[in-house]
Amino acid sequence: MRIGAPDQSPAGIAPAVTAFLKTPRMLIGGQSVDGEAGSFEVFDPANGQVLARVPEASEADVDRAVRAAAAAMQGPWGTMPGAARTGLMLKLADLIEEHGEELAQIETLENGKSIMMSRLIEVLSSAEYIRYMAGWATKIRGETLDVSIAIPPGTRYTAFTRKEPVGVVAAITPWNFPLNMAVWKIAPALAAGCTVVLKPAEETPLTALRLAELVREAGFPDGVVNVVTGGGAVGAALVAHPGVNKITFTGSTDTGIKIGTRAMQDVKPVTLELGGKAPMVMFDDMDLGLLGPATGIGIFLNTGQTCCAGARLFIQRGIYDEAVSVLKGIVSSLPIGPGMDPGNQINPLVSARHQAHVQAAIARGIDDGATPLLDLVAPESGYFVAPQLFEGAAPHCALMQEEVFGPVATITPFDTEDDVIAMANDVRYGLGASLWSRDINRLMRLLPRVQAGTVWINSHNIPDQNMPFGGFKQSGLGREHGSGALDNFLETKSVCVAYS
Ligand code: NAD
């Protein structure tokens, strides 16, 4: 069912969703399979009820998936022209749209997020992302090189480079944008001609498993895409598997460090998209009318569970009191409730564990001396946490330094450009940041001083498939999206040709 054709069943849940949730299966070598290690429960964050039981992969399952992906590199996929790969990817994008409402509902049920977000970001922007990457499959190119080799005398040379798929890719993804993150990994890997074993987050494996069914339906050869489910141990088995040629990971910095360390033992290339603690820097001359999108999108999009969320606001003294008062009003008016109701902008957090983590971060902030500005109430059933803004957080307290990844932000006044740049950069992260001002000279002057992979001007937290995305400092290694996205999945081979 396409998005925009609402289902009429009483609970609002499409019959196809109910049917899928009964027996979700992994995809290994083109076969739909259960997990050798049993199964685990996935919960609906809106009510804490069990939503589905999902296969738990064993090490042997991981091994089979990697072998299937390696075998697929040697099969028809390995020699398939780029245009044919494009065709398969476009078919997959069409299928995602065709099953859009179903995927959106599964996403909201497993993750808790607003159904509007699931429709627009998880589904429609994932389909667009695949189409964008499908276009690069026919544009892979090397270079011709002049060389100066002088031996043996009389021999002449010419050289060129070939770009070749790196091989089997292990893709490990987090729970905050489950379908989107899976697609961000799979699409450029397929465009480059690689095969993939995807391990989605254990909290939200369901849309990846439904995506696997659509991959089969699109007609990809067996083993080109495999999906295994389970916890961190399944991811670790994948990272350590000798048959994996490349690792691409999105998740927390702590897990990223473990994965990167393990990958280096085998000298495997690794791309890491990690955590963030983004600053939003608001100057006296900003358009205060932008505080609405700054709050709704910049800070509280996905209930603050975004890696670029503007978790640290810095507001210049001249507008400080007025801006804080407006922000408090906006946040207090955000409707809180289950994601299946599109009117709700603050939804449950992904899991009971994460709810406890966010609640603990709020309590610690208060213990450390920060002042909470809001007194909002969250629904009791489900994994809700009411949004909170803090003033007076000390620069090096946990609230200012550690990722909360929930509906929580600090607000700090500043006087000068130098002061605020020093504070904005004073974290181990460097993923996103934003500057809010009408003064182009100020903005251009400050841009090079902001340590972040993406700097938004008068906006925040909106990535695009054509904009390279990744982190400075401990926010990651490498860039996704854009014209360079396929480079993560290609090896460069120099070819030197001697002739007389
Ligand atoms: P996480 O690091 O706990 O888990 C991410 C994935 O890694 C999961 O699939 C998990 O099962 C797996 N994993 C855990 N331990 C592993 C191990 N030792 N070896 C291999 N795999 C392992 O992260 P999370 O809590 O699921 O996601 C939230 C985090 O993701 C936040 O820190 C957020 O900032 C980050 N994130 C970053 C980006 C980005 O593009 N930079 C985007 C979204 C989320």
Image (tube, grey):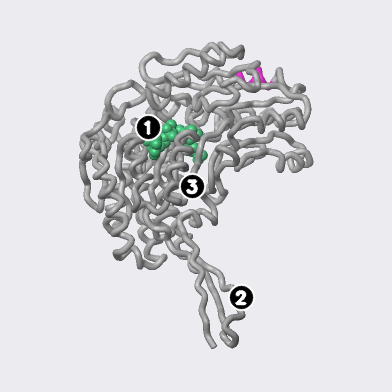
Q: In the image shown, does 436 or 308 lie closer to the viewer?
A: 308
Q: Earlier in the sequence, mark 2 or mark 1?
A: 1
Q: Earlier in the sequence, mark 2 or mark 3?
A: 2
SS majority, magenta: helix
Task: Give the crowd class for mark 3: few <14, some 14-19, many >=20 residues within 10 Å.
Answer: many
Q: Which mark is residue 108?
A: 1
Q: Percent x, y for residue 380?
A: 39, 13
Q: In the image shown, does 337 or 75 lie closer to the viewer?
A: 75
Q: Say what amino acid the circle numbered 2 marks.
A: Asp
- Give the quadrant of residue 324: top right
Label 3 near ligand 1 (CB < 8 Å):
no
Q: Which residues are magenta?
A: 323-328
Q: Vertical placement of 220 versus 353: above or below?
A: below
Q: Say what amino acid the circle numbered 3 marks.
A: Thr
Label 2, label 1: how many angstroms apart (C-alpha)? 55 Å
**Residue labelled with disc 3:** 271
Label 2 sits on a secondary structure element that is loop
